[in-house]
Image: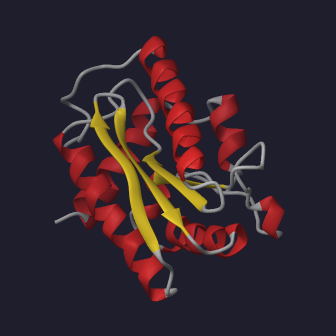
């Protein structure tokens, strides 16, 4: 099987950390403008040094269509507050009027019940909380690993699976689900 990770500009720790700082700054700027709204920060969960290329952009765009369909099916009012497509990855920030718990349930459904959602992180935040709402906050089970039934965080921390194995999974998802 062809890998979707054969092209793209490799990103190192400095670039990834700078992207994280940019993300936090954007979240603060959005909350300054929309202090009483729920924020959904969506990006791809991509292992390895290639974080963006034409395939990952296509995967991102198709997945976002699925998330928006979930918002619309739930009758949620949303708008895009910011979006970027950089070498460190694509990211989109939605602002919604609905309560954080209601939004988190829809985002978990997207992550767990759509073919592409497993490759995404959809963090749900409100201004006065110090962290994003977790699945645990809703009494939901932890997110499962792409490749096994263990908690994803446990596999990531222990590096149980190789980058190549994880990239092979994402490549397979891409070729099976993105048109």
x 27%, y 66%: residue: 177
The scheme the figure's colours follow is: secondary structure
Q: Is residue 83 visible?
A: yes
Q: On the picture, is 134 further left or further right than 103?
A: right
Task: Examine the rendered structure and indicate whether residue 112 appears above or below residue 88.
Answer: below
Q: Position of residue 151 (x, y in %)?
A: 71, 51
Task: Examine the rendered structure and indicate whether residue 91 appears above or below residue 25.
Answer: below
x 60%, y 67%: residue: 108
Task: Examine the rendered structure and indicate whether residue 161 appears above or below residue 117.
Answer: above
Q: Nearer the viewer, residue 24 or 162?
A: 24
Determine which quarter of the picture holds residue 24.
top right
Q: On the picture, is 66 further left or further right than 75?
A: left
Q: Position of residue 120 (x, y in %)?
A: 47, 53
x 21%, y 27%: residue: 8
Q: Nearer the viewer, residue 22 or 51?
A: 22
Q: Position of residue 44 (x, y in %)?
A: 42, 46
Q: On the picture, is 14 further left or further right than 101?
A: left
Q: Quadrant of the C terminus?
A: bottom left
Q: Is residue 1 visible?
A: no
Determine which quarter of the picture holds residue 131.
top right
x 66%, y 40%: residue: 155
Task: Examine the rendered structure and indicate whether residue 53 appears above or below residue 65.
Answer: above
Q: Nearer the viewer, residue 60 or 27?
A: 27
Q: On the picture, is 145 further left or further right than 44?
A: right
Q: Position of residue 75 (x, y in %)?
A: 49, 87
Q: Nearer the viewer, residue 135 or 78?
A: 78
Residue extending furthest toward the front: 33
- Tag count in the figure? 0
């Amino acid at each position: 099987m062809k890998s979707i990770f054969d092209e793209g500009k490799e990103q190192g720790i400095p670039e990834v950390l700078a992207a994280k700082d940019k993300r936090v700054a954007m979240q603060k700027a959005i909350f300054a403008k929309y202090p009483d709204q729920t924020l959904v920060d969506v990006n791809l969960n991509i292992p390895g040094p290639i974080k963006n290329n034409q395939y990952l952009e296509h995967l991102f765009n198709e997945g976002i269509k699925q998330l928006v369909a979930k918002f619309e099916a739930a009758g949620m009012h949303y708008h895009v507050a910011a979006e970027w497509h950089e070498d460190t990855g694509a990211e989109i920030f939605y602002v919604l009027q609905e309560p954080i718990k209601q939004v988190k349930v829809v985002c978990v459904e997207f992550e767990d019940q759509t073919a592409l959602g497993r490759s995404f992180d959809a963090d749900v935040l409100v201004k006065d909380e110090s962290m994003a709402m977790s699945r645990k906050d809703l009494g939901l089970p932890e997110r499962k690993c792409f490749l096994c039934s263990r908690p994803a965080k446990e596999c990531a921390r222990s590096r149980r699976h190789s980058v190549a194995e994880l990239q092979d999974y994402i490549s397979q998802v891409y070729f099976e689900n993105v048109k």
